[in-house]
Image (spheres, rainbow, N blue to C red):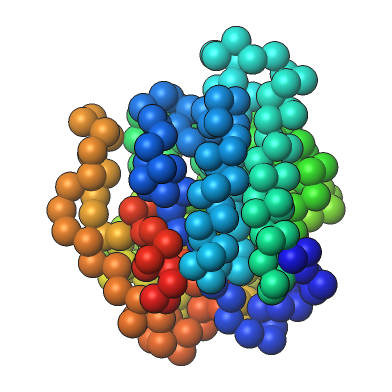
Amino acid sequence: MQPARPLAAALAEETLVLDGGLSNQLGAQGCDLSDALWSARLLVDGPEQIEAAHAAYVRAGAQVLITSSYQATYEGFARRGIARAEAAELLARGVDLARRAGAAAEREVWVAASVGPYGAMLADGSEYRGRYGLSVAELERFHRPRIETLAAAAPDVLALETVPDEDEARALLAAAEGCGVPVWLSYSVEADGERTRAGQPLAEAFALAAGNDQVVAVGVNCCEPAAVDRATEIAAKVTGKPVVVYPNSGERWDATTRTWRGEATFDPSRVSAWRTAGARLIGGCCRVGPEAIARL
C-alpha cells in the first residue's frame, strides 16, 4: 500500500527490508537482458515483466522497491531511436510499475527511483572503475535531466546508487539539490570496505553527505557481502545517518564475457551484525533473489 510515512521517518523507527536484484529476477522470468539497455529495455518491450519482478519481491517481504531506471538514460534511449519525450515517459513508467506492485501489499511499500552512475550508460563495466575523464560539472549536466524527470514522477526517494567515486557523488548530489525528493547515496566499494571503486578513502566519500539534509541514508551496494561490515561502520560514524546496504551475491561480474563467476557468499544471517553497525535499510543487489530476501 501507499506509505503513510516519509522514508526518513520510517528509518528512524525501524529497519526496512529492501528488494534484491531486478535483473536476476527478470532473467528467472525468462527475459533476455543482453541489450545494452539491460533491464531498462523492458520499460519499452515488457513493462508487465518489470511489474511482475517487483511483485515477486513484495511477496518475499520487501518494503522498498528500486525501479528499473539504473541503466535508463536519455542518451541510452536515443541510441535506440527513442525520442526525448518518449524517454521521459519511460522513466516515469518505471516509478509507476513499482508503485503498482507495492499497492497490492497490506503493508507500506516505498519506491526508490534508481539513478545509476555514468558508467552504467556506457555498458562496458566502467561503473566499477569510475574516473571517466569527465569533470564534476560535466557529470552533473549528464545526471540532472534524468533526476528531474524521475523526481517529477513522485518516488519516495532517489537511489543514487553504485557510485564508484567521490567526484560522481559530488555531481549527483548537486544535480539532485532542490528536486523536492530525498535521496540516499550508495557507493560501490572495494573488498576491504574502506575504499571506493576508484580507490578513494570511503570516510572522505561519505563526508560529502554528512551535512546534507536531503540525504536520508548513506551506504554501499553492488559489492561483496564481506565489504559491508566495515563500510557500514564508516558510514554511520562519518555521517550519523541511517545506513543502506545491499551487496551482491558474492559472485563477480566479468564485463568482457558478460557472465558471473565464483561462488555466492550472501548470507542473510549477517543482518544482525549489519544492524548493530547502523544499517537500517537492508537488501540485496545483483544475483540476490526473492528467496534470499525472504530469509533476510
Query: In this rendering, does residue 5 appear at all?
Result: yes
Q: Looking at the picture, does residue 249 appear above or below residue 25? A: below
Q: Looking at the picture, does residue 194 appear above or below residue 133? A: below
Residue reaching furthest to the top:
81
Q: Quadrant of the N terminus?
A: bottom right
Residue at x-position 65% and y-position 54%: 101
Q: Residue 189 falls in which quadrant of the image? A: bottom left
x, y (%) of residue 202? 44, 64
Query: In this rendering, does residue 234 appear at all?
Result: no
Q: Nearer the viewer, residue 49 or 16?
A: 49
Q: Quadrant of the C terminus?
A: bottom left
Q: Residue 243 falls in which quadrant of the image? A: bottom right
Residue at x-position 47% and y-position 48%: 22
Residue reaching furthest to the left:
262
Q: Nearer the viewer, residue 107 or 196?
A: 107
Q: Looking at the picture, does residue 251 appear above or below residue 234? A: above
x, y (%) of residue 234? 46, 75
x, y (%) of residue 229? 36, 77
Residue 103 relative to residue 35: left or right? right
